[in-house]
Amino acid sequence: MNQAFVDASWQEQSGPDGRVRGLGGWGLVLLRPGTLPARFQGQLLAPDNNAAEVRAVLEAVRAAPAGEPLTVHTDNQAVIASVGRGRGPALLDEEAREVQAEALARGVTLRVVYAPRTRRHMQSAHDLANDARRGSGSGGLLDPRSDVLIEQRPAQPEARVSLRRPGERVTAHVPLDLSSDVPPSAQALLAAVGLALPGEVLLVRRASRVAQALWQRPERALRPAAQAQLHHARRAADESGVQVEFLGTG
């Protein structure tokens, strides 16, 4: 069973025009059988903390494997009522419907349950959300171009992928399978592409030459399983209108 532990952080702010709005952060820890925990975080503008909490659930659905059940753990009762039971505050109706629509589109059977902050992974999600909120960010997604930085060291079991778009930034700590047919640097690149929104142009920095070559021509992979995974990722990106441009090598 795939499990995600989610949390959000929110702070009321006054903009230069005097209007009050909130800056939020979300964090999640995704657990999949047989893999190390994957950590994700992002920053957003949100009307209140509950909206930021629902966004964390949405990101968990996006990050989880398609076609598989997912249990999301949260300490927010409004989120459980809205997303899990469809009986939450009216202000969260639109956000809750977006989560359910995403789960349906990806074939994810979603459960939302309560977990106390004292749980190990809940505390990690809380820390990720706070760290994301403290970063800088303003405005909305007006420009389809997003900067992506891949930080991956040889023989290390984890890569750090940072995606910055106007008004938001997302960071993923991606476990790497060193025994996979797909090279670790290409795994990190695929994780970066997986964070993209439809129609987005990713300006990728520090992707290795191997990762770039395999993305541009998946048939260069030495093993059929790797070719199939790379071709699938390319097709999914093309169908979503996601473009990848490389700005240098790692």
Image: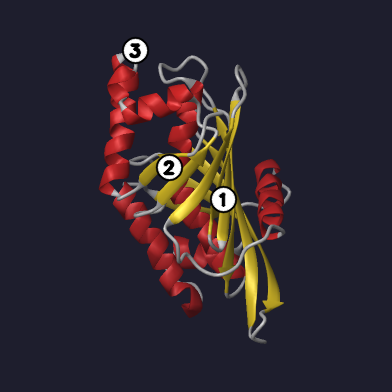
**Is 225 above or below relative to 197?**
above
Residue under label 2, please give it: 194
The residue at the point 32 percent across, 18 percent down is 220
**Crowd rating for badge 2 (residues with CA inside 10 Å; few <14, some 14–19, many 20+):** some
Sequence-first disc among 1 and 2: 1
**Crowd rating for badge 3 (residues with CA inside 10 Å; few <14, some 14–19, many 20+):** few
Residue under label 1, please give it: 170
Mark 3 residue type? Leu
Sequence-first disc among 3 and 2: 2
Of the two numbered discs 3 and 2 in the rendering, the one whose residue sits closer to the viewer: 3
The residue at the point 28 percent across, 20 percent down is 219
Mark 2 residue type? Gly
**Crowd rating for badge 1 (residues with CA inside 10 Å; few <14, some 14–19, many 20+):** many
Q: Give me the C-alpha separation between circle 1 and circle 2.
A: 12 Å
Q: Give me the C-alpha separation between circle 3 and circle 1.
A: 32 Å
Sequence-first disc among 3 and 1: 1
Q: Where is residue 35 in the image (x, y as percent from the top left)?
A: 53, 27
Let me know if residue 69 appears in the view.
Answer: yes
Q: Position of residue 180 (x, y in %)?
A: 44, 17
Q: Quadrant of the C terminus?
A: top right
Residue under label 3, please give it: 222
Pointer 3 with pointer 1, Cβ within 8 A: no
Asked which secondary structure carries label 2, the reply is helix
Asked which secondary structure carries label 3, the reply is loop
Mark 1 residue type? Val
The residue at the point 45 percent across, 62 percent down is 143
| Image-quadrant location for residue 145 | bottom left
Foreground pick, 37 / 68? 37
Name the residue furthest front.
Answer: 248
